[in-house]
Image (cartoon, rainbow, N blue to C red):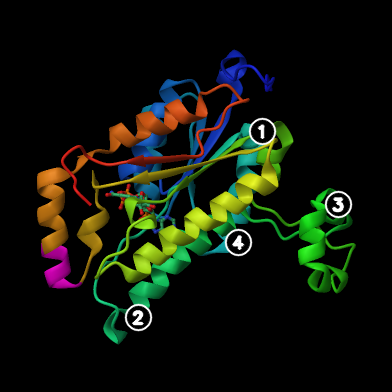
Amino acid sequence: MGRDGDHVMSDRNSRVAVITGASSGIGAATARALARDGYRVALLARRADRIHALAAEIGNGAIAIEADVTDRDSLLGAAERVQKELGGADILVNNAGVMLLGPFTAEQREEQRQMVEVNLLGAMTATDTSCQSRRAMKSAPQSILTLNRPRITSLNLTATWYEVFLDQLRDGGGDLVNLSSVAGRTARPGNAAYAATKWGINGWSEALRQELQPGIRVIVIEPGAVATELPEHITHDQTKQAAEKMYESTAIPAQDIAEIIAFAVSRAKRTTINEILVRPTGQAG
Ligand code: NDP
């Protein structure tokens, strides 16, 4: 796979990128950017028509896989297809997300839960490691074994190694790119649950960075306002109006974020850009 410590460019044509939430916005732009750079891409999302059209546009072995990140079985099926049809993933971009902003009230309860399910648990599930095998016991760092001793000793040690994309990344030494947000660093009224998911992504990513090094690079992207469908789904009227006004005056194109992701994963393997906070020049907070 050409994964020497010096450079990743030598064997780029055979590398495979899996992008969740590839049917629009940053995910679709990232798929285009990585395909342009020679990656074969697997496009995951619920809107099958969109990802099939994008796969046809991209060509070069791109495949579309209808998958809901809140449904672990559909992700397991997606991982199986990526393994069979593309030979496994070198990059996983955990991008699928929803931003259903609004005050933290009971009326928003379902949306709060949806954000946690998609933005945080969806990314965890797509990556997913259950550590339920002898192999896990052998390969897990001592610190994990110590921390989790009560849980691990009660496991069935012959259990299958259930993983979604992490084992594929491990095979060749891959990149895990997690979409966080400026909201992963700044919380404000109206974004409590959304910010919680993105702060969660940041904490999870930092722990994984340390657990998975040096084999897998973990890269966190924290965009500000980007012109996508994201604010269109907000249901709380007042919040939606304020968000749309802010986006209209400030947001940058999704391609700008896609280029940054493409840049980050093209660095020499010895170097990791751990975290990128990127705002429109005109965005204050
Ligand atoms: P879009 O709404 O354009 O894209 C969101 C993507 O997530 C869609 O492709 C959608 O596909 C997918 N998605 C939503 N729910 C699910 C689900 N249950 N299973 C699988 N896929 C799902 O927004 P963006 O491109 O802006 O968002 C991409 C990421 O960037 C998100 O994580 C977002 O939080 C983050 N971000 C965006 C910012 C912005 O200003 N736009 C700023 C900071 C971060 P489908 O509906 O077809 O399933």
According to the picture, the residue beneath numbered tag 3 turns out to be: 135
Mark 2 vs 1, N-terminal side: 1
According to the picture, the residue beneath numbered tag 4 turns out to be: 73
According to the picture, the residue beneath numbered tag 1 turns out to be: 87
Q: Is residue 69 visible?
A: no
Identify residue type, mark 3: Arg
- Tell me: residue 55, above or below residue 71: above
Q: How far apart are marks 4 and 1 (CA)?
A: 20 Å
For the residue pair 231 and 5, the one nearer the viewer reads as 5
Q: Which residue is drawn at 69% across and 56% down?
A: 129
Q: Distance between the residues labelled 4 and 2?
A: 25 Å
For the residue pair 91 and 82, the one nearer the viewer reads as 91
Disc nearest the viewer among 4 and 3: 3
Q: Counting other residues with Cα less than 10 Å from the Cα at mark 3, is it few (<14), some (14-19), or many (20 or more)?
A: some
According to the picture, the residue beneath numbered tag 2 turns out to be: 109
Q: Is residue 26 visible?
A: yes
Q: Which residue is drawn at 16% across and 59% down?
A: 243
Q: How far apart are marks 4 and 3 (CA)?
A: 23 Å
What segment is highlighted magenta in the picture?
236-241
Q: How far apart are marks 2 and 1 (CA)?
A: 41 Å
Q: Where is residue 273 in the image (x, y as percent from the top left)?
A: 50, 33
**Mark 1 element type:** loop
Identify residue type, mark 1: Gly
Q: Position of residue 29 (x, y in %)?
A: 34, 35
